[in-house]
């Protein structure tokens, strides 16, 4: 549905439904705030099931890595009695470690998920909580990811909607291709200019 430049598409509706389901699940199981699960659901929701499954797999791997590093961070920080210097120096090191490990296991698409999980958990743990608190935040990210995959499984678009989504993706690719072509021409121009200056 289009209203001028604004469009309400299936993915937008599915994202809103995913957040609503996260809120409902956490309300009925008295699971506290659904913030992390809702964010995980929105991050994991893609235009179709196969993309969601592929992205969901890399997100689960990223969540696991970020969650494990967050638990490690929590244990070290509690050992040093929640000293600010641990947060100041250890957390950036763990962010770098997230990137290095994700790249090393060829999970580049899960890097953002890994860092987001690490930071969300590490920076939201109240002082005095147990390691179980950190573990439960990791489980919340899995809940959100599985909700996103389930929504795409049960809410697969009809052929007409799929065609519209493909046309939209193609239009976006053409815009990006034009921008890349322009950047390529600018780089070639700079190289030619440097060649003339050297001569």
Image (spheres, rainbow, N blue to C red):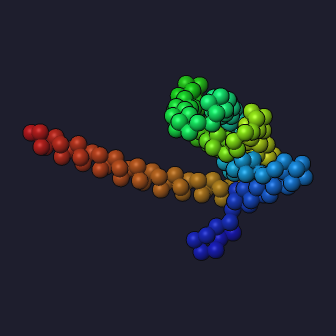
Q: Residue placed at 35% from the left, 53% from the top?
A: 182
- Horizontal relation, residue 95 to residue 178: left or right: right
Q: Nearer the viewer, residue 130 or 14?
A: 130
- Extreme-top residue of the structure: 104
Q: Nearer the viewer, residue 31 or 44?
A: 31
- Extreme-front residue of the structure: 81
Q: Position of residue 194 (x, y in %)?
A: 18, 43
Q: Quadrant of residue 171?
A: bottom right
- Extreme-bottom residue of the structure: 4
Q: Residue placed at 72% from the left, 47% from the top?
A: 36
73 is higher (above) or lower (below) than 34: above
**Is residue 161 visible to the viewer in this orientation of the structure?**
no
**In which quadrant of the rendered image does the C terminus lie?**
top left
80 is higher (above) or lower (below) than 173: above
Q: Position of residue 107 (x, y in %)?
A: 60, 31
- Horizontal relation, residue 108 to residue 19: left or right: left
107 is higher (above) or lower (below) than 147: above
- Extreme-left residue of the structure: 199
- Horizontal relation, residue 127 to residue 190: left or right: right
**In which quadrant of the rendered image does the N terminus lie?**
bottom right
**Is residue 126 visible to the viewer in this orientation of the structure?**
yes
Q: Quadrant of residue 55?
A: top right
Q: Residue placed at 64% from the left, 74% from the top?
A: 3
Count of picture labels: 0
Q: Position of residue 85 (x, y in %)?
A: 53, 36
Q: Nearer the viewer, residue 41 or 53?
A: 41
Q: Position of residue 56 (x, y in %)?
A: 70, 39
- Horizontal relation, residue 37 to residue 90: left or right: right
Q: Residue placed at 56% from the left, 53% from the top?
A: 170
């Amino acid at each position: 549905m289009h209203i001028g430049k604004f469009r309400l598409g299936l993915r937008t509706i599915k994202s809103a439904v995913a957040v609503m389901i996260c809120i409902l699940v956490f309300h009925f199981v008295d699971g506290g705030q659904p913030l992390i699960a809702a964010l995980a659901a929105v991050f994991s929701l893609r235009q179709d099931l196969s993309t969601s499954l592929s992205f969901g797999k890399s997100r689960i791997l990223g969540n696991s890595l970020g969650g494990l590093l967050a638990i490690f961070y929590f244990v070290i920080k509690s050992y040093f009695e929640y000293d600010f210097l641990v947060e100041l120096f250890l957390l950036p090191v763990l962010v770098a470690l997230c990137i290095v490990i994700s790249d090393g296991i060829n999970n580049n698409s899960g890097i953002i998920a890994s860092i987001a999980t690490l930071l969300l958990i590490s920076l939201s743990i109240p002082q005095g909580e147990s390691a179980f608190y950190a573990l439960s935040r990791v489980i919340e990210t899995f809940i959100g990811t599985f909700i996103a995959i389930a929504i795409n499984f049960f809410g697969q678009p009809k052929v007409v909607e799929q065609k519209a989504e493909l046309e939209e993706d193609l239009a976006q690719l053409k815009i990006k291709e034009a921008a890349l072509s322009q950047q390529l021409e600018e780089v070639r121009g700079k190289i030619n200019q440097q060649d003339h200056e050297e001569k």
